[in-house]
Image (cartoon, rainbow, N blue to C red):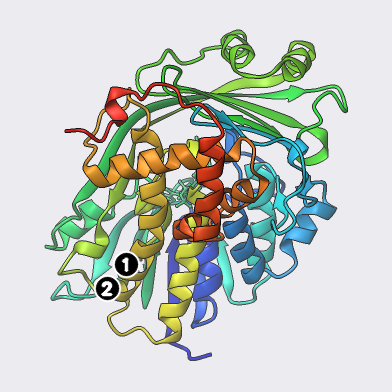
């Protein structure tokens, strides 16, 4: 593979940074990954990834990319204790989406296996594989405090680092800097320092508060691999219960758009017991909390539009949550980071000329699909404030019809899983064969009275 430069520096060693580093290692003689945190010696939650204490699902589309970049890693996760949902048995997942409960009998023959490692377990496995690459170094204990540039500021030439333990500043030169420092990325500020405009932002305020608790659940008390109850009009709570490695269970409860968040495990139970069916209620009432309750707030879904900037310095690209962070209830962030890595790989295969522009355009295509689906799902909730132009209202209405069909039709359910799992484009739901099934299911079911917010009138 063509060598494009001596050194690439990746800022941030979380999912987006690790996958980007793996891709950069194909084209740069050395890759240095910088993080505030030291690389963990075992699976554990890092300070720099506080969201890792909360329910994380790696969608099938993201898992496929991770396995392509690190062949065999999914099998390693399973061998080390991660549960795998590989038989498509619909009784093994309980999902309620927009007030519709997925069909619970039968098998989805064509669905790819889903792996259910906890976030810390997944990241640690990816880090192990990344660290095995001979030209990659992970350098912890350093804060990224600035970018260096050529005299005319047209090219980023490296990063300014501050040591965490020893208060020293140093400069690390780079032919390519990849920013993957997450939602708090300071690239907009660094751009202004270099004389460039910062990106504009698209934003939908969701005011989500997550509360999570590890649980000890009696073996076999929950037959499902995963339970996920998404917000529905009139009740903006989310309840997720995920069976992770080695029999551990993580419960996450969310409250959106001003709904009262859970402070304690007792509060979480009140919300969860309201949402889940009787057999899960019984298991939860018997479960023992393990460790402390964790909290996290996400104010909004936010997309920094680097793809729209006309002027941007060479030698710098931005990826992952640093570009777009979503309402996490839809579990998209890591998979979008994976699709970003694929886009970066394709762009680097064609050389580094005009790389920032080409990459930001390419990654925006994957982001746009995930963004529209998350934003439309949020706007389907009348309580979420935001513009609902005609196209959005039509999409919301169509989604509701599809979800109605999912209550009874395995084929539609499978197609929906493939779309939300980022394996297929949303347009696959509009194939005539699927539309016919959606129509049949909706005709067979009496419809409730429409809510005015979702009406097409006006
Ligand atoms: C509560 C919650 C639940 C989520 N659930 C899911 C889910 O179920 N499925 C899913 O796919 N996604 C989920 N996500 C999104 C997912 O966590 C992110 O998309 C994913 O971590 C990729 O983010 P990232 O690597 O871009 O940034 P981050 O994960 O935020 O990592 C940023 C890294 O940069 C480092 N860093 C930051 N600033 C500096 C600096 N100045 N100097 C040095 N190092 C720095 C940090 O230490 C960290 O390692 C969830 C997010 C949240 C908030």
**SS class of the residue under badge 2?**
helix
Is the C-beta of the residue carrying label 2 under 8 Å from the nearest atom of ligand 1? no
Give me the disc on residue 360: 1
Q: Residue furthest bottom?
A: 2
- Could you tell whether 446 is left or right of 357 in the image? right
Q: Residue at x 37, y 61 (%)?
A: 170
Q: How many other residues sit within 10 Å of disc 2, few (<14), some (14-19) or many (≥20)?
A: many
Label 1 near label 2: C-beta < 8 Å?
Answer: yes
* Residue under the point 39% across and 21% down: 449
Q: What percent of the width, then of the height, locates residue 88? A: 75, 49
Q: Which mark is residue 280?
A: none
Query: Which residue is located at x 15 percent, y 75 percent?
Result: 151
Q: Quadrant of the C terminus?
A: top left
Q: Nearer the viewer, residue 131 or 274?
A: 274
272 left or right of 341 in image: right
- Asked if 328 appears above or below 111 in the picture, the reply is above
- The alpha-carbon separation of the residues under discs 2 and 1 comes to 5 Å
SS for dot 1: helix
* Displayed quadrant of residue 327: top left
Tell me if 108 is positioned left or right of 8 in this view: right
Of residues 412 and 35, the one nearer the viewer is 412
Pointer 2: what residue?
A: 357
Q: Is residue 282 above or below residue 367?
A: above
Q: Position of residue 370 (x, y in %)?
A: 42, 52
Is residue 131 something one can see in this rendering? no
Q: Is mark 1 within 8 Å of ligand 1?
A: no
Where in the figure is residue 55, as x and y percent of width and height? Answer: 60, 35
Residue 433 visible in the displayed image: yes
Relative to the observer, which residue lies in front, 416 or 64?
416
- Residue 343 lies, with reference to residue 374, above or below; the image says below
């Amino acid at each position: 593979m063509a060598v494009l430069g001596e050194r690439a520096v990746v800022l941030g060693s979380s999912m987006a940074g690790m996958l980007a580093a793996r891709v950069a290692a194909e084209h740069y003689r050395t890759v240095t990954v910088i993080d505030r945190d030291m690389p963990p010696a075992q699976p554990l939650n890092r300070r720099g990834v506080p969201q890792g204490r909360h329910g994380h699902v790696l969608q099938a589309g993201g898992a496929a990319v991770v396995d392509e970049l690190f062949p065999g890693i999914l099998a390693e996760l399973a061998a080390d204790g991660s549960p795998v949902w590989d038989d498509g048995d619909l009784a093994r997942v309980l999902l309620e989406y927009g007030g519709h409960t997925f069909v619970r009998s039968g098998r989805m023959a064509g669905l790819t296996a889903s792996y259910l490692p906890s976030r810390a377990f997944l990241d640690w496995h990816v880090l192990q594989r990344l660290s095995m690459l001979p030209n990659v170094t992970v350098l912890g204990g350093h804060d990224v405090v600035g970018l260096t540039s050529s005299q005319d500021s047209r090219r980023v030439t490296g990063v300014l680092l501050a040591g965490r333990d020893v208060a020293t500043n140093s400069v690390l030169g780079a032919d390519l800097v990849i920013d993957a420092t997450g939602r708090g990325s300071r690239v907009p500020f660094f751009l202004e320092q270099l004389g460039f405009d910062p990106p504009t932002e698209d934003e939908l305020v969701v005011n989500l508060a997550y509360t999570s608790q590890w649980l000890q659940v009696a073996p076999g008390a929950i037959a499902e691999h995963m339970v996920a109850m998404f917000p529905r009009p009139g009740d903006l709570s989310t309840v997720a219960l995920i069976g992770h490695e080695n029999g551990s269970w993580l419960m996450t409860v969310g409250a959106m758009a001003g709904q009262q968040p859970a402070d304690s495990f007792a509060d979480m139970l009140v919300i969860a017991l309201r949402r889940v069916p009787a057999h899960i209620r019984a298991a939860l009432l018997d479960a023992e909390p393990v460790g402390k309750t964790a909290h996290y707030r996400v104010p909004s879904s936010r997309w920094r539009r680097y793809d729209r900037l006309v002027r941007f310095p060479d030698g710098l690209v931005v990826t992952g949550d640093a570009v777009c962070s979503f309402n996490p209830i839809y579990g998209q962030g890591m998979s979008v980071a994976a699709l970003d890595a694929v886009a970066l790989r394709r762009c680097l295969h064609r050389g580094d000329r005009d790389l920032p522009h080409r990459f930001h355009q390419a990654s925006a295509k994957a982001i746009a699909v995930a963004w529209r689906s998350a934003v439309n799902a949020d706007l389907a909730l009348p309580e979420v404030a935001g513009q609902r132009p005609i196209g959005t209202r039509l999409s919301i209405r169509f989604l509701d019809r599809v979800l109605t069909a999912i209550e009874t039709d395995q084929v539609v359910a499978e197609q929906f899983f493939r779309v939300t799992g980022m394996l297929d484009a949303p347009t696959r739901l509009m194939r005539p064969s699927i539309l016919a099934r959606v129509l049949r299911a909706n005709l067979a079911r009496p419809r409730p009275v429409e809510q005015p917010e979702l009406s097409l009138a006006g």
